[in-house]
Image: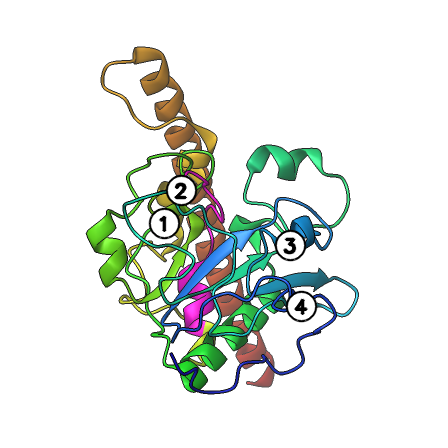
Amino acid sequence: MAKTGPQQYPGASQAYRYQGVYGGDSMESNVVVWHTTEGTSLPSYGGGAEAPNFTAKPDFSAKRLVWYQHFDFDTSSRALVNRAGGVETNTLNVVQVELVGTCDPAAHKKWSGQHLYTPELPDWAIRDLGAFAKWAHDQHGVPLTSGLTFKAYPSSYGNSSVRMSNSQWNAFKGHCGHQHVPENDHGDPGAFPIAAVLAAAKGSTTPSKEDNTMATTPDAVWKADVIPAAAPPYNNSDYSKNKQWTAAYALGSAVLTGRRIEAKVDALTKQVAALTALLKKG
């Protein structure tokens, strides 16, 4: 199959290319699969045996992502499990990107140094991920859409509710995560901010409703992401889990109430300052 469009992402280092060792299949990629490396350095990927197409590594001092390219954009890479029978994974028109960092709240809490944690990506990381998504759209036609929930880790691991069926996977185009791919059990990239990334790709800082099913208001984000990460999934058959979930929800609601009060106080303070300035002039 012919490979249409530029195959090398501008500015990406070609120092760790594995295409000469693992040739891969040519295809026309229309899906981006996002991963996290669950580490803080550039992985060796077993000499390329488990490599994606790209790795994005944070440079915290420069506040940017440094890109490494391992395979052409339209050449199959090797970061997904592909079991016998069923569906194709690595070779089904997918380009794969590993972000150096973690989606695991336990690792995030344990690691002492600077690192990327997907539920809390800085603006510059979202900017650079959006730039890649835009390039993939402009040069290769990958839709700037998802329509999927990026579930927080560890509940995203295994056969979770967000894992696609074989038929859904075969029909999918756009942006998904490792947690969505059939025949796989990994839960990365966890609560990846796909709506923000796609908004950045579209030149906006406000995610559109069609970007994915994740809520974007402060209240809804807390309910959808923070509370599930702090407590196990709600389970009608397990009172202890219900009690823990309810406690986390109550805490979240209290925090949100405090935030709303702070916002109102700030607004009133600004109004008083403006009126005081007018009185002084008068």
**Residue 85, horizontal then vertical, whole percent:** 29, 44
Q: Counting residues from the N terminus, which is met first, the one under dot 3 or under dot 4?
A: 4
Say the numbered circle drawn on residue 17: 4
Which is more toward the observer, 246 or 101? 101
Q: Amino acid at mark 2?
A: Asn
Q: Which residue is mark 2?
A: 184
Q: Residue at x 49, y 51 (%)?
A: 262
Q: Amino acid at mark 4?
A: Arg
**Residue 248, horizontal then vertical, whole percent:** 42, 28
Which is more toward the observer, 167 or 211? 167
Which is more toward the observer, 24 or 205? 24
For residue 141, side relative to residue 203 (left or right): left
**Residue 130, horizontal then vertical, whole percent:** 50, 72
Q: Secondary structure at mark 3?
A: loop
Q: Residue at x 60, y 32 (%)?
A: 106
The quarter of the picture where residue 99 lies is: bottom right
Start-end of magenta stretch? 184-199
The answer to whether mark 4 and mark 2 are in CB contact below 8 A is no
The answer to whether mark 2 and mark 1 are in CB contact below 8 A is yes
Q: Secondary structure at mark 4?
A: loop
